[in-house]
Image (cartoon, rainbow, N blue to C red):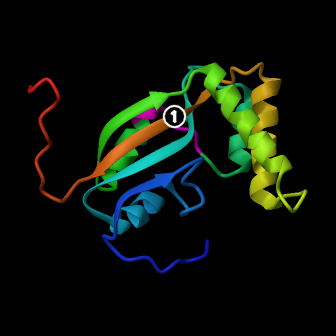
């Protein structure tokens, strides 16, 4: 990963679309790096693949293992972010139709790349789409949008919306 000189605490929100795997060797390392960039009370929004079913087809498991990724359930993602200094605010799984629409958008973007091969990241995206389609569009994974807030050490949890 190439280091970029960005100001600590200089961002109100950081959005990691697609995956945080490009920011560090693990989710926790990547989210700690992003946390330093956020201002106090700043937000982190992530879209990433997550497990949503009990049974993970072997083709899907093999694909993500080949990329060095462990597919987490949304709750496991929240827990990992909490360990990295974030307070989870929301997590929403896309519908199968929305995931298919997302992949169609990604495919059209890949077709417009100046480099027809698009590099390793483009090749991985193409393989991900193939796995999704080969499994009938329901591969026991989904795209999840997860939003968290930068939490400070010793900070008490905020009250829930219902005031409880």
Judged left or right of residue 32, residue 66 is right
> The C terminus lies in which quarter of the figure?
top left
Q: Residues within 10 Å of mark 1 (few under 14, many from 20)?
A: many
- Residue under numbered circle 1: 144
Q: Residue at point 52% right, 42% down?
A: 47
Secondary structure under the numbered disc 1 in the rendered image: strand
Count of number-bearing discs? 1
Judged left or right of residue 34, residue 98 is right
Give the answer, above or below, for where 30 lies relative to 87: below
Find residue 148 and report its horizontal and vertical position in percent.
34, 45
Q: Residue at point 10% right, 47% down?
A: 156
Q: Residue at point 74% right, 56% down?
A: 121
Query: Visible in this render: residue 140?
Result: no
Query: Visible in this render: residue 8?
Result: yes
Residue placed most toward the observer, 143 or 59: 143
User: Is residue 66 found inside the magenta-colored segment of the image?
Assistant: no
Q: Quadrant of residue 31?
A: bottom left
- Dominant SS type (magenta): loop
Q: Quadrant of residue 52?
A: top right
> What is the magenta range?
70-75
Judged left or right of residue 58, residue 1 is left
Judged left or right of residue 111, residue 8 is left
Give the answer, above or below, for where 97 lies relative to 112: above
Find residue 21 and report its horizontal and vertical position in percent.
58, 55
Give the answer, above or below, for where 154 lies relative to 144: below
């Amino acid at each position: 990963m190439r280091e970029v000189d960005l100001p600590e605490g200089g961002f109100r929100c950081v959005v990691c679309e697609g995956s945080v795997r490009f920011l560090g060797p693990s989710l926790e390392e990547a989210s700690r790096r992003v946390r330093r960039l956020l201002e106090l009370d700043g937000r982190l929004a992530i879209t990433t693949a997550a497990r949503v079913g009990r049974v993970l087809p072997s083709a899907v498991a093999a694909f993500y293992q080949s990329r060095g990724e462990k597919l987490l359930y949304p709750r496991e993602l929240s827990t990992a972010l909490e360990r990295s200094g974030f307070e989870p605010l929301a997590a929403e799984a896309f519908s199968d139709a929305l995931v298919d629409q997302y992949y169609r958008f990604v495919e059209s973007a890949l077709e417009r790349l100046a480099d027809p091969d698009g590099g390793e990241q483009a090749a991985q995206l193409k393989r991900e789409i193939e796995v999704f389609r080969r499994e009938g569009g329901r591969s026991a994974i989904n795209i999840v949008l997860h939003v968290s807030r930068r939490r400070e050490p010793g900070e008490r949890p905020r009250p829930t919306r219902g005031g409880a």
